[in-house]
Structures are given as C-alpha cells and as structure tokens.
Amino acid sequence: MSLRTLLVTLALCLLPISELRGGLPFALSNDIPLPVAYLICVGANALVAPLVYLFLSSLHRLLERWQPYRRLFDHIVERARRKVHAKVEKYGYAGLILFVAIPLPITGAYTGTLGAWILGMDRRKTILAVFVGVIIAGIIVATVFTLGIKALYFFLK
C-alpha cells in the first residue's frame, strides 16, 4: 500500500460527496486488503460527525455573519432537514442510523450529522448513531464491491 493510495483513500472518506462510498471501493481497487481498507475507511468516515460538530460550534459562528456563506449554509441546512426529518421523526436515533447506513448520494455522515444538529438531537448519541451507520454502510459497500468484482470475473470467463 503506497502513501499516495492511503492519503487518497482518507481524503475520499472525509469528503462530503464520496465519503465511505467512494473511499472503500478506491482502496479495494488499489489492492488494500479488505480488513485494512474497511478499518481505514470506517475510521475516517466516522470522524465526520465530531468534525462537523466542531465546525458548527466554532468556525460556523464566525462565517455566519457573511451573507454569501449564510445563504449557502441555509440551502444546505434545508436540504439536510428535508432528507433526515421524516426518518428521525418516526424512528429517532435508529432512523438516523438507517439514514447514514444507506450508501446512496446525499445520505451519509455529513447529512446525518447536520440533520441531527438541526433537529436538536443529543451530540453524543448522534455521534454514536452516525458511527453505527458508518459501520453498516461499510459492510454494505464492501459486500456490493466484492460481489460485483466476483460477478465481473464470472461473466468475463
């Protein structure tokens, strides 16, 4: 495993768009063994929740005074609220886990954490729920990737 591959994997897992959905397939396709890739990607993506809370409690307060930032942030917040509200309203923290666990675009640790913050959910319980959701998402992504590669080899024979 090269340092470049490791750094790209970590970056993908920490980026809002790709998160674990992009980092884990990248790591696996660059010959990082599944157990190592899984631990790296889940660990990095699990850091998102505490980092988002750190941002919201510090830098966000400063940037909020700047009109272009406030408009962009309000747009992002509204989108996150719409996405998360129904599941969390109905199922609570289990709904948050499920929301984060589904490895689709606009679901994941960033949107889940932001949505929980908007809804006033407990910080520690949110971080734990996001962590559990990331673990489940990692299992799903690893399974789909592994089965997809096996199916590809089967059809190419």
Image (cartoon, helix red, strand yellow):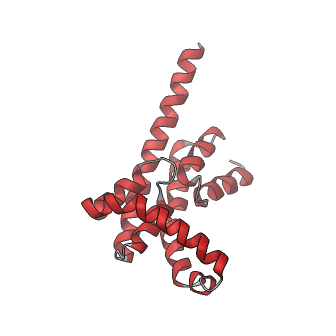
Residue in the picture at 52% in, 79% down? 56
The picture quadrant where one finds residue 125 is: bottom left
Camera-side residue of 149 and 57: 57
Q: Is residue 46 left or right of residue 101?
A: right
Q: Is residue 137 left or right of residue 156?
A: left
Measured as percent of width and height from the top left, residue 70 is found at 59, 77
Measured as percent of width and height from the top left, residue 67 is found at 64, 80
Quadrant housing the C terminus: top right
Q: In the orientation shown, which residue stands out farthest toward the top? A: 157
Q: Is residue 89 left or right of residue 51?
A: left
Residue in the picture at 58% in, 81% down? 60
Residue 154 visible here: yes
Measured as percent of width and height from the top left, residue 90 is found at 25, 60
Measured as percent of width and height from the top left, residue 104 is found at 48, 47
The picture quadrant where one finds residue 129 is: bottom left
Q: How many marks?
A: 0
Camera-side residue of 43 and 102: 102
Position above or below: 26 against 148: below
Q: In the orientation shown, which residue stands out farthest toward the left? A: 90
Residue in the picture at 48% in, 30% down? 147
Residue 131 visible here: no
